[in-house]
Amino acid sequence: CGRLPVWGEMSIFEHTVFSGMRPSGRLHLGNYLGALQNWVTLQEEYRCIYCAVDVHALTDIQGEATKEIRPNVQEMVLDWLAAGIDPEKSLIFVQSQVPEVMVLHSLLSMVTPLGWLLRVPSFKDKVRQLDATEETVSYGLVGYPVLMTSDIVLYKADTVPVGEDQLPHLELAREIVRRFNHLYGPTFPEPQAKLAEYPLIIGLDGKQKMSKSLDNHIELASDEEATRARVLTAFTDPERLRRTDPGRPLICNVYALHKLFNPDKLDDVYQQCTSAQIGCVEDKHLLADGINNALEVFRERRRELAERTGYVADVLRDGALRARVIARETLAEVRDRMGLSEIVL
Ligand code: AMP
Ligand code: TRP
């Protein structure tokens, strides 16, 4: 689609941002508040690259279910664009369409001790979640953070806007970079995480991080009624059994969400909840109103974008073409540093 054919036009910025999300369908409030909002803001000050990491999705989707990946990419990128990611400012692409990242993954895996990977907390959690053992999980799952490091360093990015759950991965990315730079000379910057103001959004169960797999999420793009219905299922103060019991906002996730969606009503909600003037149901309706108001523009924009046939595909094609130019250059440098022969064309 002809926008920004040369990367150089963007290089007025000193720093490069890279971030990715797995194409697991439509995004939820956790993705939005923990990462996407930050992605949008950073576009003004950084050279930004945002990636739909479909190869990472293969670490937990297999066989027939992989048919969902392509439509999921489409839905997720629509969410990005509707939230304000601007293809004129940012490079947006699908991970597997820049296959150089998989070569870099193999090369970086040569400098990554297995012990580092086995110690990553999210790896241990995932093994448990899959009801597997370290013996039975895929080699790809163990290497998840190496692929993530490859995503980032392929573009020599130094800033990575993510939610709090990704911090251990970035710690490991820095270790891999330090090791590579030590062995082969300074090549990559050490990537730093950039957290949003609220880097961990708790789900409707009031306990665990909001996530699609735990089904405790609110989708960004769902309509007002569906959002309200979801909010009404939220857990509140478990000790508030009767309408007349005073509530404890400080331990209630609905109150935590009011901070984000009803900042101007916060004092009133606190006072009315602790004095049992409003009940939890009323309180949740207030929250649903706040969320629906905040997302009105997003939803409208998403509807408009969804009607533009071929738009997402064009944006992604353009992004992949431009990303490959950078990727090839970095990979040639890495091959050279690692003593590999030049590619014969
Ligand atoms: P994922 O859907 O796991 O690929 O996550 C995409 C991005 O959203 C990552 O930067 C995550 O850290 C962030 N994220 C996902 N869930 C949450 C949450 N509940 N709170 C804050 N950030 C989140
Ligand atoms: N692991 C990230 C997640 O689950 C997704 C991801 C893949 C990523 N590669 C990345 C995030 C590179 C930031 C940078 O959300």
Image (cartoon, rainbow, N blue to C red):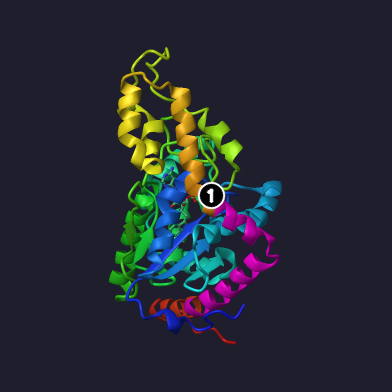
Residue visible at 55% across and 58% down in the picture: 82
Task: Check the image and name the residue furthest to the bottom.
Answer: 345
Toward which corner of the image does residue 179 lie, by quadrant?
Answer: bottom left
- Mostly what secondary structure, the magenta segment? helix
User: Can the viewer see residue 205?
Assistant: no
- Image side of residue 95 versus residue 49, left or right: right
Residue 315 screen position, x and y as percent: 59, 70
Q: Quadrant of residue 230?
A: top right
Q: Which residues are magenta?
A: 298-326
Residue 217 within the segment the image draws in magenta:
no
SS type, badge 1: helix
Q: Amino acid at mark 1?
A: Glu
Quarter of the image where the C terminus is located = bottom right
Confirm whether the magenta stretch covers residue 315. yes
- The residue that mark 1 highlights is 296
Q: Is the residue marked by circle 1 packed among few (<14), some (14-19), or many (20+) residues within 10 Å?
A: some
